[in-house]
Every structure is written in C-alpha cells, then in structure tokens.
C-alpha cells in the first residue's frame, strides 16, 4: 500500500491543481482561513510606497507584522469605522462578552500583551485610588517590587513591568521565592514560555494565595491550543495576558488582559480615555476592541483538530518536497509553548548543497514572491499557519529550488 509520505512526494512533482490534500492547496477548504485576494478592489498602497510584501513562512512575528485578520474580524473592524461609541462603554460590553466566552471573571482589550503587563501591574500597585493612579511611575508609598520567575535568558518583555516604576527581583527556586517576599512585594510574575526557574506555575499561584499577593502570567504567543485561554485563570492566576494579533488573528496592535475584575477595573484607570496616566499612549480604538471580541468568538468556534491536521499535512508536503534534494534533511517538530503549531526544521550538508543557511534565507527574501522563513545559522525553519493555503506550494517549491540550484 502506498504511504502518505509517498503520496506527498508524488504531489510535490505535480503542477498546482485543485482538490489535493483535503482541499488546502486550492484555498477553498471550508476549514481554511478564506484566502480571497486581499488586494481585490484596493489601490496597491504598498507598491506605491516602494514596499515589498512577502509570504510569511515564519510565524506570528511582530517585526513581520504578526498575522492577517480573517474576514470576520475585518468585517467587525470595518463596521466600527462607520459609528461613534463611548470608549469606556465598548470596553465594558466587549470585556464582559470576552470574559463570558473564555470563562474568566473579567477581561479588557489592551494595546498588545506588553500593554496588558504594564496596565495590569499598574492596577495592582494603585488600586482604584485616583491619586495613586496619577502618581505612577513615582512609586513613593506604594508596594513596588515584582518577583519574577527567572527566564533562561534575558527577555526584553519584562520592561513592560518597569514602565510602572517597579523594581524587578528574579528568583530561581521556591525557597528563594518565599525568602524574597517582603511587605513591599506587589506582584509575582512569570513569562509563560520563558520560565527558567524550578518553580512551577501552580506553585507560584499557591505562594501568591498564601501571602495574599496577586499573580500574573504573560502568555502572549501561547495559543494554540485554545484551552490556554482559560487554563491559567482556572489555575488561579489573578491576571493573564495574551497577544491579540498572533494565534487569535485579531488586530496586531491589540491584546487581552484576563482575570480578576477588581484588578482589571483598576488597570483600566491607567488606560485611555484618561489622560494623566502612564497608559495614555496605550490606546485601543473602537475598531480594535470590537475586532478583538470577534476574533475570540471566531477562534473558539474553529474546528481546531481539523485545522491542526491541515497544518500538519502542509508541513509534510513541504518536507517531502525539499527532501527530493540530495543532502537535505528535515525534522518535524512542535514548539512546547509559544507558537505551538506544526513546524519544520530544514538542514543540509553544505558539501552537497553549497549554500549557507543565511545565503538561502536571503535568496528566498529576494525571490518572486519574497518569502520570510525562520532562518538561522543551522538551517531554515518553516511554519504554515500564517500562510494562505495557496502559498504553501510556492514556499515548498521555492525552498526546493534554492537548495537544488546550490546542489553540487
């Protein structure tokens, strides 16, 4: 019996036709992300500006403009552009709806996960005292130390906490954690994908409850799986942050702050439309708030098993295509936490394929169309979840051709 891999290898040598691999090659699969031409009916603005667009074979990278909003989310955005609404009122109603969908106490839309971190901590430090709200980042008289579970390497995102004026103290063990707590400790914090300490998240929650100190978990890029949207509030974290423009496919400049209602309402006091606060520049407009709510609705309604299988089959197709070049090796993998999706690592013997990973990455960038991969010193990495369905073959053939052209 012919194997799935053999089928994929045979398809790799066929022209682009419809009906293959469950329909994903056509872009018409009802479980796909509706890949109608995004340029239809629009001026070619980026071309006018001298900007080159590309196929995103890397992932939800901020520098690569994150993700593309699906039609339902764009429809919500466009609808909001035609109407005026009170900003606090839409935050209230959308926050209630998002909290209901996810199953947490309360929610608000923020200007990304970084903003959620700053606002969340600010709310913890000030409470609803207006004088304290306007006082930050002057922390005089306030609890202003945050204990952070040490990441395995420096991670710049924690600067969001420093924006409040707080001092960060890193710990690696449960004993250090408890010994570091003082009357000045405002919050306990962990970067979900970068916990290099021996303290488990459940332990952090338990310590927070024992000492009556709020706990915060930053989960910016940590959906899928969808259960993470409620996993950590269910675990007992007081505050949890997610990026809106990554796996949720909402606006790139939006995020979510989930958790305790009293803390989130205090955090909102630092956010627009209020002016004399550290969060004034972290504005989210009515379009972003409504689009983020619809992004959550859409995400929870997806058939995630079918979506995963589609991503996996796409990765296997790219894998079988590039493996037709002698000297090329591939490895299928799924990152543990952040960007937890089917992915492919491509390496090769440079004695057989005379091109460095950096050179291959640059050739793909300069190609027609341009392709952005996760290039590195050891090889290339690829994920298909931010690609349109019709782009998968283009990426597969382009990588194959770059490596085949360099083959000895």
Image (cartoon, rainbow, N blue to C red):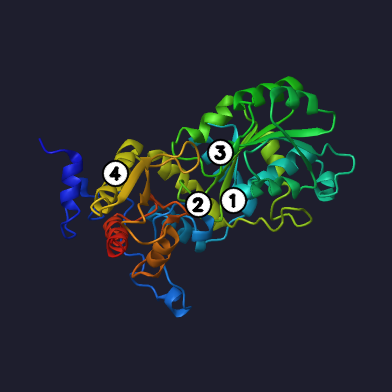
Q: Residue at x 35, y 41 (%)?
A: 332
Mark 1 Cα-neighbour bin, 10 Å: few <14, some 14–19, many ≥20? many
Q: CA distance from mark 4 to mark 1?
A: 28 Å
Q: Residues within 10 Å of mark 2 (few under 14, many from 20)?
A: many
Q: Work out whether mark 1 precedes mark 2 in sequence or the reverse, and give the earlier one.
A: 1
Q: Is residue 371 visible?
A: no
Among numbered discs 3 and 1, the one appearing first in the sequence: 1
| Residue 1 versus residue 267 in the image, above or below | above
Out of 256 and 161, give the one closest to the viewer.
Answer: 161
Spatial separation of the CA atoms under disc 3 and disc 1: 17 Å
Question: Circle 1 sits on which residue?
Answer: 112
Q: Is 193 left or right of 300, judged from the image as shown?
A: right
Q: Are marks 1 and 2 in contact (CB under 8 Å)?
A: yes
Return the x and y of residue 290 as percentages of the image width and height.
51, 51
Between the C-alphas of marks 2 and 3, the distance is: 17 Å
On residue 319, the disc is none
- SS category of the residue bearing label 2: loop
Residue at image point 53% right, 61% down: 83
Structural distance between the alpha carbons of marks 3 and 4 = 25 Å
Secondary structure of the residue carrying tag 1 is helix
User: Mark 3 or mark 4: which is in front?
Assistant: 3
Quadrant including the C terminus = bottom left
> Mark 4 vs mark 2: which is more N-terminal?
2
Distance in Å between CA atoms under marks 4 and 2: 21 Å
The outermost residue toward the front is: 351
Residue that extends furthest to the left in the rendered view of this protein: 1
Q: Which mark is residue 245?
A: 2
């Amino acid at each position: 019996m012919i194997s799935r891999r053999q089928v994929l290898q045979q398809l790799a040598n066929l022209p682009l036709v419809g009906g293959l691999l469950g329909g994903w090659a056509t872009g018409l699969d009802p479980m796909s992300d509706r890949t109608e031409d995004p340029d239809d009916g629009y001026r070619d603005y980026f071309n006018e500006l001298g900007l080159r667009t590309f196929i995103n074979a890397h992932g939800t990278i901020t520098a690569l403009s994150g993700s593309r909003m699906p039609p339902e989310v764009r429809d919500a955005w466009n609808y909001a552009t035609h109407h005026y609404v009170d900003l606090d009122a839409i935050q209230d109603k959308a926050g209630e709806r998002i909290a209901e969908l996810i199953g947490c106490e309360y929610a608000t839309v923020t200007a990304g996960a970084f903003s959620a971190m700053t606002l969340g901590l600010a709310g913890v430090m000030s409470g609803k005292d207006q004088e304290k709200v306007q006082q930050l980042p002057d922390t005089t008289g306030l609890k202003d130390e945050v204990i952070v579970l040490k990441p395995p390497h420096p991670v710049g995102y924690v600067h969001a906490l420093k924006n409040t004026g707080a001092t960060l103290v890193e710990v690696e063990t449960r004993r250090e954690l408890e010994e570091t707590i003082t009357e000045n400790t405002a919050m306990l914090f962990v970067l979900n994908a970068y916990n290099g300490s021996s303290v488990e998240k459940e332990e952090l929650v338990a310590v927070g409850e024992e000492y009556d100190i709020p706990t915060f978990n930053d989960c910016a890029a940590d959906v899928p799986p969808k259960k993470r949207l409620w996993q950590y509030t269910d675990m007992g974290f007081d505050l949890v942050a997610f990026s809106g423009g990554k796996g949720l496919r909402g606006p790139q400049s939006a995020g979510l702050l989930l958790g305790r209602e009293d803390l989130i309402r205090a955090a909102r006091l630092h956010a627009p439309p209020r002016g004399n606060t550290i969060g004034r520049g972290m504005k989210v407009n009515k379009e972003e708030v409504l689009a983020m709510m619809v992004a959550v609705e859409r995400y929870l309604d997806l058939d995630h098993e079918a979506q995963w299988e589609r991503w996996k089959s796409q990765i296997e197709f790219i894998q079988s295509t590039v493996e037709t070049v002698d000297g090329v090796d591939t490895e299928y993998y799924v990152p543990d936490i952040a960007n937890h999706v089917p992915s492919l690592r491509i390496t090769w013997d440079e004695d057989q394929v005379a091109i460095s990973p950096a050179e291959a990455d640059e050739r793909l960038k300069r190609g027609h169309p341009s392709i952005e991969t996760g290039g590195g010193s050891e090889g290339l990495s690829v994920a298909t979840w931010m690609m349109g369905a019709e782009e998968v073959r283009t990426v597969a053939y382009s990588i194959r051709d770059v490596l085949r052209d360099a083959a000895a």
